[in-house]
Image (cartoon, grey):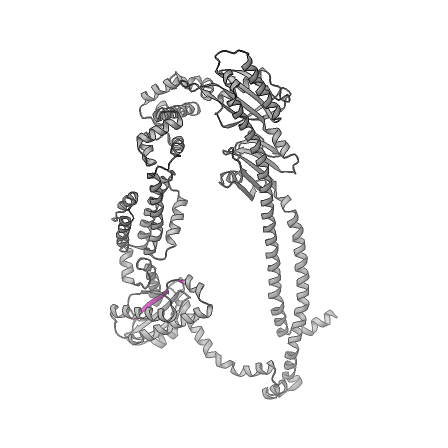
Amino acid sequence: MLKNLLDRYRGKKIFINMFQAVFILPAVCIFFTCIGGFYWFKANRIETEKQNDSSMLYASSLIVNNMTDRMSNTMKVLRNDNSIQKALAKDVFLWDSDMSLAAREVLNMVTVEPLLHSIYVLKGSDYLLKCSNPAYPLGNAADQMMIETFHQSHFGKYGVKYYIDIYGKSQTLLYITDGELNPRTAEKNSGILIGMDIGKAMDEIFPALLGGEQYLLTDAAGNIVYARGEGYIKGEILADPPLLTVLEDDKLRHAEVMKRKDGKFLISCVKMENGFYLMHILPYKYVAVSINQMRFTFIGIVLLLVLLLLLFSFGMSNWVYYPIDAVIKTTDPANASGQSFESLSGRLGNTELASIVKTFRTMFQTVSDMNLLKEQKELTHYLSRSSLSGKLPEWVEETYGKPGIHSRVICLRISDMKDLHENHTEDAITFALQTIASVTEQVLKPLGDVLVQSVDEEYTAVLLFMEEQVPMETLTAKIRQIFSVTRELVYIGMDAGISSEKTGFGELAAMYRMARAATAYRYMYGIDAIITEEKMAEMALHGADSINTKNLLLRLKEGNREDFREEYLAIIKELKKCSIQSARDVLLDMAGEILKYYNSLNCYFDTLSLSDYEKLRAQLDSYDYLDDAWEWFAKMMDKVCSALDKARQGEREDVVDQALQYLRKNYADPNISAQFIAELFHITPSYFSRIFNERSGYAFPDYLATLRIEEAGKILLREQNKSIQEICEMVGYSNASYFTATFKKKYGITPGQFRKNGTQSDTFLQQ
């Protein structure tokens, strides 16, 4: 039966074409709709998983934060306890009532907080009191380790210690210290060390893991404090770029599906208040389980819909083709020879097929229109091709060819294509192009024969064939008349490029190309610009080397908006005499200097990267005209003035922290001084020196010298091939003798002796 059905319609192209028309497009729509639906479901599912995982990890981070907060609160209680303060204040160890009260307070703290590992109250190189959780017995070696940890720590900051307990089990200790420094030696006199078993805490928070799943607790530098699961281990450093990218993100919560060298993973990260990061690494296969199940569901839906569409298309095509098949049979000579169109129309009556029969008689009337369209396409192809080797359509020269003819090409360009498409329908755009062509023909017709051809929606080529030369002033006036009439009729702005005048027809393509290139210089002149080929060539040869932009930055630093605008307009006036590239380069340089100055006001002193300049160039290139670029510079002027106002009002409480960060990065700069740093932050040197001493506890020169000498010690041990002079210059000193004297004052030995001591010097650095 199926074979008979196929034989019945085999070779009947009309039926096959109708079937294809009814079936293929809906089938494609169904196919792509289902694919789109699946990918929508997939994206939605992944986003849900990301949100859920991020929320779970955030809740876990709150638990960890709560533990560290309890450590901080315990430290505050102990630091404020009178008995502990009295015990620490004594010069000799003496067990008295104060010591008993202090011991009881420490014991209570460990008892109340079951996750606390130990608490040490230390003085000098020994401890006064210690209390440890019974699960972590600590002998003399462990006590010595805790004392060393205290002296190597930074007060008020969390640290991590790994050690093997007496049972041979690896322990991870999160600790915090606080105490008093010797005012003369800056060494730790006394204090308190509180430790917590962060490993046990992590194991309790994340008890069960899937295969390949891992939880990491890291610091901002990527050092792994603790690892739960397979993969990284504690003490390692993150070396996977995707994971490092997550750490560099400033977001509080981050979740993303990323590719790593060992596969695809859902990676979530939470930035915690104490400077640590909690990260969850989940293999993508667990996320994709429900997605894979839904994939088969979508495949089944597609197959079912295509089958139903196949049946529908066949039935619809057969229903439509049946009367056509009857017409074909009646016109077949074997069935009804000699039948005329009139008799056939009589048999069909007023059906659609009768109209089709009548349409055949009018088909030949469209041939001339098709030839016209073909000629237009030939001319468009000739003008818009990339090579100049093409041949001018013969009909152009045959139609407009006359002895001694002068030709000139004008390229009309619509100024704002974005506005045209956003505010006009396709029919309106077509009408606008037809209006432009009609107006152009009418306005330029008195000058000679005019051939107007729309090359595309933006550009229209106007070929003007004149028997006599036309002055440029006359031609320019006519083009401005075209602009005026067009704006009144279809509300469209335009600009134009004009080629040089030639004799004959041989260079029309090159002339159009030059006229089109000239329209690019509208950037310099604005809307309604008319640029000749000669003017374009003249400007293309002019650079911008002699334009002085330094005064613009001076006006900016003064915060004077009016003077800044006047200086900017003077520069723009000079730029309009240069090439487009020169003008854009000068604008980019100006913008770069302004952005660097603005960054310095916000305490960001890094040089602009290539990426920064590319972003700047993209922002400036987004303006269609040179005059419009003022918008960017005006906004930056407002930002700079606002920053300057804040600086003048003294709202720079973070200046010392910013200065310390700057010194750590740039300590090797020999030009650094208190005055230099003060100028960076727009404050006076005396004020800076005072607040630096108050906030850091050091005079500025002493802090800088200490920082440089400590870095020199590290380089001496790390780079054995470097000479003392080279290391001296690497840390910011120009005089090797002064460097040696300063180094000896710090460590008691010369740089050469320090290097010879080797391991002993390394230990000295760590202390």
- Placement of 685 over or under 101, stated as above or below: below
In the rendered image, residue 453, in percent from the top left (x then y), is placed at 39, 70
- The residue nearer to you, when weighing 73 against 22, is 73
Residue 265 in the image: state x and y as whole percent: 59, 42
In the figure, is residue 393 to the left or right of 120? Answer: left
Question: Which quadrant is the N terminus positioned in?
Answer: bottom right
Camera sees residue 507: no
Q: Which residues are magenta?
A: 407-416
Q: From the viewer's side, name the closer residue of 379 and 579.
A: 579
Residue 751 percent location from the top left of the image: 38, 19
- The x, y position of residue 563, in whole percent, is 26, 48
**Does residue 295 appear in this view?**
yes
State the image quarter where residue 120 is shown.
Answer: top right
Residue 258 falls left or right of residue 693: right
714 vs 647: above or below: above
State the residue at coordinates (31%, 76%).
402
- Taking the spot 59% from the left edge, 86% from the top edge, the residue there is 341
By secondary structure, the bulk of the magenta-drawn segment is best described as strand
Say if 673 sits above or below 569 in the image: above
Q: How many marks?
A: 0
Q: Is residue 269 magenta?
A: no
